[in-house]
Image (tube, grey):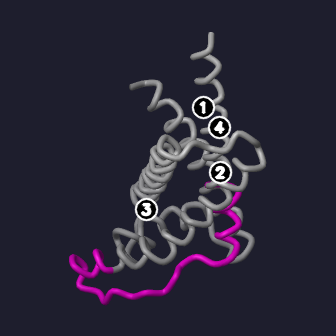
Amino acid sequence: MMRRLKPILYAGAIVGVLDITAACIQTHIEFGMTPMRVLKGVAGGLLGRSAYEGGFAVAALGLTIHFTMALTVVTVFYLLSRKFPLPEKLLGVVAVGLLYGAAVFAVNNFVTAYFMSWVRSLYLHTPAVFKPPMGWSQLVIHLFCVGLPIALVMRYVNGNQRRSLRS
């Protein structure tokens, strides 16, 4: 059990930190937003616009949601990599990682965002709105801070597991 959980936790931590750091840097450069506001925006997926009026607890909720999503995305990749093994060559692993990052971006932007808007509409009585929240810079972040690190961590773990099985 721990052998399966370890790579998910490692990759989840790495991806969670890289992704939120990149998002905070990107939004600060583009819009002058603080990390606290970014985290409140993540919590806004559940709380709606009132999240921006919240304090530290709302930002902490946003961070929790963010890392839960990171662990979910990593777990999905881990399970897929058990069914469809990663390529042997590093270039193939990089390509798989970048494709996975693009897929995560597309699902987050066009499925999850709309779904959360619909769920929020049920308990906040607001209209479900479809407006993709992420732009091109977020695609780049998902490619290099989400998909690629996940694929590289899983390659590293798989390589170590194969070596330990041989010895």
Of pointers 2 and 3, the one earlier in the residue sequence: 2
Q: Are discs 3 and 1 less than 8 Å apart at CB?
A: no
- In the rendering, which numbered label is found on residue 158? 1
Residue 17 x/y as whole percent: 61, 48
Q: Are discs 4 and 1 less than 8 Å apart at CB?
A: yes
- Indicate whether 57 appears above or below 167: below
At 36% from the left and 79% from the top, the residue drawn is 117
- In the rendering, which numbered label is found on residue 18? 2
Q: Secondary structure at mark 3?
A: loop
Q: Secondary structure at mark 1?
A: helix
What type is the residue that disc 2 sits on? Leu
Q: Residues within 10 Å of mark 3 (few under 14, many from 20)?
A: few
Q: Nearer the viewer, residue 165 or 31?
A: 165
Q: Residues within 10 Å of mark 4 (few under 14, many from 20)?
A: many
Residue 88 x/y as whole percent: 70, 39
Mark nearer the viewer, 2 or 1: 1
- In the rendering, which numbered label is found on residue 155? 4
Of pointers 3 and 1, the one earlier in the residue sequence: 3
Residue 107 x/y as whole percent: 49, 69
Q: Secondary structure at mark 2?
A: helix
Mark nearer the viewer, 3 or 4: 4
At 55% from the left and 61% from the top, the residue drawn is 36
Q: Main secondary structure of the magenta part?
A: helix
Mark nearer the viewer, 2 or 3: 2
> Marks 4/1: CA distance?
5 Å
- In the rendering, which numbered label is found on residue 55? 3
Name the image quarter holding the C terminus: top right
Of pointers 4 and 2, the one earlier in the residue sequence: 2
Residue 103: which quarter of the image?
A: bottom right
Q: Nearer the viewer, residue 127 or 47?
A: 127
